[in-house]
Image: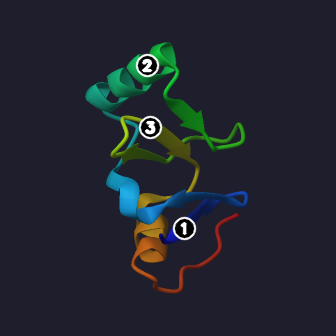
Amino acid sequence: MKLVNIGFGNCVNADRIIALLSPDSAPVKRIIGDCKEKGTLIDASQGRKTRTVLIMDNDEVVLSYLQPETLTQRINGEEAEENE
């Protein structure tokens, strides 16, 4: 199991991530709304602007304030600049 920091010390299992999406499109906003209703939304953005939506393999959705590029680098094990 590889844990990836998604900001503010919050981590997710990298092996369970299906997709990293931008929150700007209407379909992604719909996914967020549906998950909020079902109770499967995890908001790890600490009240900041959501920049990445992580779709997990267990039908949960995680919101992060970090850029998708930053998270991609962290998942791939590359050294990323700290944007916190």
Number of other residues with Cα within 10 Å of mark 1, as a class: few under 14, some 14 to 19, many 20 or more: some
Number of other residues with Cα within 10 Å of mark 2, as a class: few under 14, some 14 to 19, many 20 or more: few
**Residue linked to disc 2:** 33
* Earlier sequence position, callout 2 versus callout 1: 1
In this rendered view, identify the residue nearer to me: 79 or 1: 1
Point 35% across, 26% down: residue? 31
Q: Amino acid at mark 2?
A: Gly
**Residue linked to disc 3:** 61
Q: Amino acid at mark 3?
A: Val
* Earlier sequence position, callout 1 versus callout 3: 1
Label 3 SS:
strand
Point 49% across, 74% down: residue? 74
Q: Is residue 18 left or right of residue 1?
A: left
Label 2 SS:
helix
Label 1 SS:
strand
Q: Is residue 76 left or right of residue 25?
A: right
Q: Which mark is residue 3?
A: 1
Q: Amino acid at mark 1?
A: Leu
